[in-house]
Every structure is written in structure tokens, then in C-alpha cells.
Image (tube, helix red, strand yellow):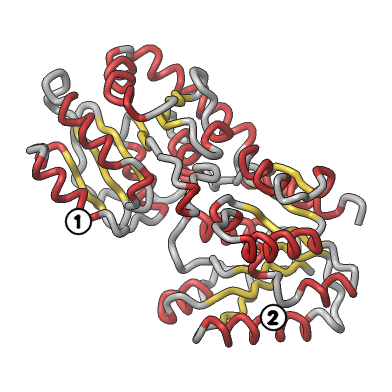
Amino acid sequence: MYLVITQCFASRVGGIENLLTNLALNLALTNEVRVFADSHSRINDEIFDSNDGNILKIFRYGGIKFLRRRKKSRDIKLFIQDRKIDGIIADTWKSLELCIDEINLLNIPTICLAHGNELLFNEEKRKNRITRILKKTKKIVTNSSYTFQLVKNLGISESNITIVNPGTEDLRLIETRNKYNISGNPVLITLARLEKRKGHSKVLEAIKQLKPDFPEIKYIIAGEGPEKKTLLNLTKKLNIEDAVIFINNVDNKGKKEIFEKSNLMVMPTSNESFNRSIEGFGIVFIEAALFGITSIATNVGGTSDAIIDEKTGLLLKNEDSLYLEIKKLLQNKEKLEQLGRNAKKRVLENFLWNNVIKKYLEFLKANS
């Protein structure tokens, strides 16, 4: 039996939520799995948990954070006492903080995932907390070379760290629907939480410049977040409302529909590590690649693991060259399509969950 301990899980939507949910589901295809997860939306959680096709047994925890963390950790410690546990996977160091000592006493192989933002700190006290738990955990799986270095910089031995880039399910195989009225030529997309560092405003400014050469251009902003009002106002200010489509929270069926109608994924993220915010990997670049869509991004954080510059997409040194690089790529259809083919081939060979789950298990079982 394997345990997945996580704050981030379906029904909540997000990159880490998607990662942990798919990790648990794919692990459960060949193993018994129990998930200890935080509650997010009681109704939506119940719908997900009771799904006839759901092969997981999920224990949910809600309420005040202080009490929730302690109740979940207490239940985990009781659960592992009289059961054979083959391994534990935790979403971050925070989920292990209150139970790692008991787990180690029982010699249960344990992996702590590392994504990026949760490893950033502005004070020594937080750094010491992170380091203490990671050293006790012994096995850390990072999502990119960038995150690997963050963990290493905390004084963790390289032999205890490995890189497993996040996996993706094959979105091409899910049901097709036509919910969104999307038409344009070309169609650009940014599928991400609406945060300042994701670079939506830079893309909007580029769209303004691109319109004379591409009068039918459309730009899809898919997601929700604190920057939405700012982006709506900027769209109006730039007088490009006819070229921009805002779509709220997108599920996997929505992703498939949008990707099938898009030509280029663009996300020029900025480095805001000083604000404890960075792109640790960029799973959306992998999801887009499944549909033969190439990506343009800035070379920040772990994006260089998701995009191979000039082979599966373009990595910019900074966003200042965004407009020109988009224009050149859109005008070179042969290169645009070749990069997309390369990206798709790489994902099919390396990033589907049936291959990725094996890497987690191999590392978990190594030297256990």
C-alpha cells in the first residue's frame, strides 16, 4: 500500500493539484493507494471522491489550518502503525513536518516532492524549517534542474535528490466538446493563473503590435487570478478587445478544445523569487506540445526543462524581444510546425504518466 499526503488535490484546480491527482491515480492502477488530502470545496470534493471510476480511497481534512494539519498528521501516524506501507509520497515538506519522525521510526520509504515556490524564503527561520524536514525525508524529487539546485543549496546531499519532470495525461484521448467560440488566424494562448509574473500584459502589448500584420489574430487568456481586472483594463486601453478572449477556469475537456484551436503557446514569465514566486517547471508547455503546439517563454526558473530552445520552442533571455520573436515565428510557418512536431515527439516519449510513474517508484525503492 502507498500513501499520498497532500494539501493540493482535486477537486481544486491548479498545476500541483493536477500533478498530485494524476500521480495518485496512475499509482493506483497497479497498487493500493490511500490519499490524505485537504478539503477545498465540499460539494466538488464529494463529486470527485465518489466518482464510480475513481480507484482511490481519499481521506479529507478541512477547517482551521492549525487544527487541520494536526488532525491529518495524527491520523497518518495512527494509520501507519499496524499496516504494511510500501511507500509514502508527499506534495511538499509542509505535509511531512508533523509526521516525518514517526514515519522514519517505521523505516517507511518516503519521497518529498519539490516544486519551486515552497522552497523560497525571506527569513532564516523558514529556511531552517525547510532544511530540517528535507534532511529527515532523505528522498526528494524535484520537478526541474532549477528546483534541484534550490534543494542542493539548502545543504541536501545530491545522492538524496533526483529530477522527475512532471507527467501529463494524454489530453487528446478525452471527450471532445465545443463550448468556446474560438476563431482566428493565428490563435495564441496563455493557459495559466492570472498572476503578474506570468507575463499576460507583455503578450497583450505584443498583440497590439502584431495586429497590423495579422489582422485576424486572436489571443486566449485562460485562467483565473488576481490580475484579471488589470488585464481586462489593459485590453480595453490597447483597443484590442476584438482580438482577446478571456476564458475562466478550464478543465481538461476545455484544455483539449482550446489547444485544438491554437497555434502558439506564449508565457513570458518573470523572476519574482524575491517575492517567493517562480516558475518551477511549466506543465502547460508539455500539455500544449501534445497537440503539436510549440511554446515561447522566458528562460526563467525551470522552463528550460519544459522547453528545449530552438528545438521544441523558444526561450527568451527577457520579454523585451517577445513581439519580434512571435512575429518571426508566425511568419516562418515551416519552423513553427517543425518545433511543434519536435515538442510532441518529446512529450510522447518522455512525459506520459505510464512512463513517469515508473521513475517515482524506482527512486522510492532505491536503497530502501
Task: Give amino acid for label 2.
Answer: Ser
For the residue labelled by badge 1, is the local secondary structure a helix, a strand or a loop?
Answer: helix
Q: Which quarter of the rendered picture does the N terminus lie within?
A: bottom right
Name the disc covering residue 229, or none. 1
Q: Residue at x 29, y 59 (%)?
A: 226
Q: Position of residue 230 (x, y in %)?
A: 20, 52
Q: Residue at x 50, y 78 (%)?
A: 39
* Residue 362 seen in the figure: no
Dot 2 alpha-carbon crowd within 10 angstroms: few under 14, some 14 to 19, many 20 or more: many
Q: Where is residue 197 in the image (x, y as percent from the top left)?
A: 38, 46
Q: Where is residue 333 in the image (x, y as percent from the top left)?
A: 33, 14
Dot 1 alpha-carbon crowd within 10 angstroms: few under 14, some 14 to 19, many 20 or more: few
Left or right: 264 with respect to 11?
Answer: left
Query: Looking at the image, which is closer to me, 66 or 164?
Result: 66
Query: Looking at the image, which is closer to me, 364 or 104?
Result: 104
* Residue 281 seen in the figure: yes
Q: Which residue is drawn at 42% across and 32% down?
A: 297
Q: Which quarter of the rendered picture does the C terminus lie within?
A: bottom right
Q: Do the residues labelled 2 and 1 touch (CB within 8 Å)?
A: no
- Can you say whether 366 is above or below 337 in the image? below
> Which residue, given by chain and number where applicable, does mark 2 sit on?
73
Task: Give amino acid for label 1.
Answer: Lys
Picture quadrant of residue 338 = top left
Q: Which residue is drawn at 75% across and 47% down?
A: 358
For the residue labelled by badge 2, is the local secondary structure a helix, a strand or a loop?
Answer: helix
Q: Where is residue 190 in the image (x, y as percent from the top left)?
A: 33, 41
Which of disc 1 and disc 2 is earlier in sequence?
Answer: 2
Left or right: 307 with respect to 239?
Answer: right
Picture quadrant of residue 143 = top right
